[in-house]
Amino acid sequence: MKEYLDLLQDVYDNGVGKEDRTGTGTRSVFGRQIRCDLSQGFPLLTTKKIFLRGIIHELLWFVRGDTNIKYLVDNKVGIWNEWPFQSYLNSNGLSDLEKHTCEWQERLDEFVINIEKSPAFAKQWGELGPVYGKQWRDFSGVDQLSWVINEIKTNPSSRRLIVSAWNPPEIEEMSKAGLPPCHTLFQFYVSHDKKLSCQLYQRSADLFLGVPFNIASYALLTMMVAQVCDLELGDFVHTFGDVHIYNNHQTQVLEQLSRSPQDLPTMKLNPSVDSLFDFRFEDFELVDYAPDPTIKAPIAV
């Protein structure tokens, strides 16, 4: 993933200080792009271990149209927990509780247990609002994923093979317990030699923590769509708006940049799956992944 490391170096060297919603502060640039040839391997970062189980379950969660973290919690994936937890704190007079202290962590752990054990609690506090899954499967009544699959199969030369998560009338509602979509829009492209490519536009990109997830997730989605549409693999193109490194990720970024990338792994999909909505976690197998150790960093919420 030299393309990713080059972008990380670019933002570290050329980013300018910018305040942000979280109060953490960033080094930020505007307008970048990377491209990955999916026929050359699965673009999963090798210079640190990436939480693939989280990527797969999150993508399946999006595809099924779910917006409640209970499915993720039940599958031991905590990448979305802090947003509804912060909303829970705010609603219970605990908004001043300092993040990542012992008390904060204890309350988060209790919150997650309640999500897992109590359907009523999960229904009240685990909902993120009309975020990705809702928009992909029900954008003002339109099932965009079903529509785009049908279009790829029946009208592959179309220049309208687009799925959007950015629904302006629902942005405020998304913000109450979750986050308005960062990866806002993606477009498929079928070439003359029947290869499927995908371009993602990401309005806001946490380069150290989020972007490796996003690359792998949309590469995997492209592979799934290609399989069910009987197409070969083309490119994944990742286009960024505000791409940034959080100020509390600087040390981790330098450690990341000191490492050398290895050969990309291979992702195998269960060839018997012929519907995008029938994929399950067990249908994915990653082969020859030998990453460097994990580099931990806090999430800016």
Image (cartoon, grey):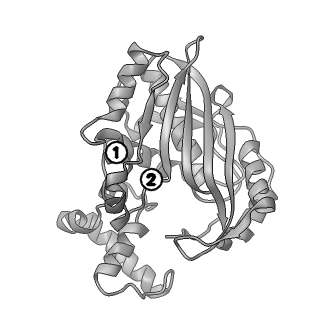
Residue most extreme to the top: 193
| Residue 181 numbered mark, or none | 2
Q: Secondary structure at mark 1?
A: helix
In the depicted view, which residue is nearer to us: 152 or 88? Answer: 152
Q: Mark 2 and mark 1: span between their CA atoms?
A: 10 Å
Tell me, for residue 149, which label it has, or none. Answer: none
Which percent across, then down, holds residue 158?
Answer: 47, 19
Q: Which residue is mark 1?
A: 135
Residue displayed at 42% across by 15% down? 155
Secondary element under disc 2, as helix, strand or loop, is loop
Disc 2 marks a residue whose amino acid type is Pro
Q: Looking at the image, is mark 2 or mark 1 earlier in the sequence?
A: 1
Above or below: residue 2 compared with residue 222 = below
Q: Does 26 sit left or right of 179 as displayed?
A: right
Outermost residue, front side: 169
Q: Who's the residue at 27% across and 42% down the image?
A: 140
Residue in view at x 63 percent, y 73 percent: 25
User: Can you see residue 255?
Assistant: no
Which residue corresponds to the image point at 38% horizontal and 63% vertical from the top-left? 178
CB atoms of marks 2 and 1 within 8 Å = yes
Splitting the image into 4 quarters, where does residue 279 fall? top left
Viewer-proximal residue among 79 and 175 = 175
